[in-house]
Amino acid sequence: MATRTTSEPGGRTFLQVAIALQTLAILFQATTAGLLLSSSHGEVLHSVGARVMYGATMVYVLAAILAWRPGGGSPRPVLHSTGFLLLASVQVVLGVAHRPAFHVPLGVLMFGLSVLALGRELSDRTRSGRVRPGPVQVPAGKRS
């Protein structure tokens, strides 16, 4: 039989990069949140980081849509990325309102969910992006 291959659309790589960027931006936010307590520059860094994180979340939505549309696959990444955009919007509102009792736990939740999304996307790639050989057919005269 012939060898079957599964092709991975280029949008999947963009999706992985977008999730990684979002995860790093949220990690940067956690770092600068700590700087808020100890440095005068912490507030500026946290404010700039918030804009970068929000932009990274919008890029994640775009990447999910681009990865979904050409292949007609599952819309699940689009739903996940839209949920992240909603969480990021709530996070910004809570931060502007100076509500750390809700802002900080939501940030921790977002970081955990972003790491899970990245791990899921990378594990999906390793399962579906490799060549999978079909069953091996041994000619009748060559069996041992």
Image (cartoon, grey):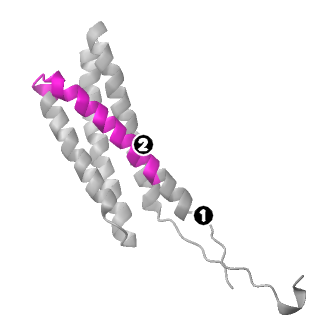
Q: Is residue 136 left or right of residue 10?
A: right
Image position of 35 with respect to 50: above or below: above
Can the viewer see residue 22?
Answer: no
Look at the numbered disc 1 and give the secondary structure of its residue.
loop
Q: What residue is drawn where x is 24% and y is 17%? A: 43
Q: Give the overall secondary structure of the magenta segment.
A: helix
In the orientation shown, which residue stands out farthest toward the front?
144
Can the viewer see residue 27?
Answer: yes
Quadrant in the picture for the C terminus: bottom right
Give the extent of the magenta segment.
95-121
In the orientation shown, which residue stands out farthest toward the bottom?
140
Count of number-bearing discs: 2
How busy is the neighbourhood of tag 2: few (under 14 within 10 Å), some, or many (20 plus)? Answer: some
Q: Point out residue 78 in the picture as x, y percentages from the top left corner.
A: 29, 58
Separation of disc 2 and disc 1 at Cα?
Answer: 21 Å
Task: Read off the residue under disc 1.
Answer: 130
Look at label 2 and name its amino acid. Answer: Ala
Task: Read off the residue under disc 2.
Answer: 20
Image position of 90 with respect to 117: above or below: above
How busy is the neighbourhood of tag 1: few (under 14 within 10 Å), some, or many (20 plus)? Answer: few
Q: What residue is drawn where x is 27% and y is 23%? A: 46
Look at the numbered disc 2 and give the secondary structure of its residue.
helix
Q: What residue is drawn where x is 40% and y is 53%? A: 15
Quadrant in the picture for the N terminus: bottom right
User: Residue 103 versus residue 93: which sits nearer the camera?
Assistant: 103
Image position of 11 with respect to 136: above or below: above
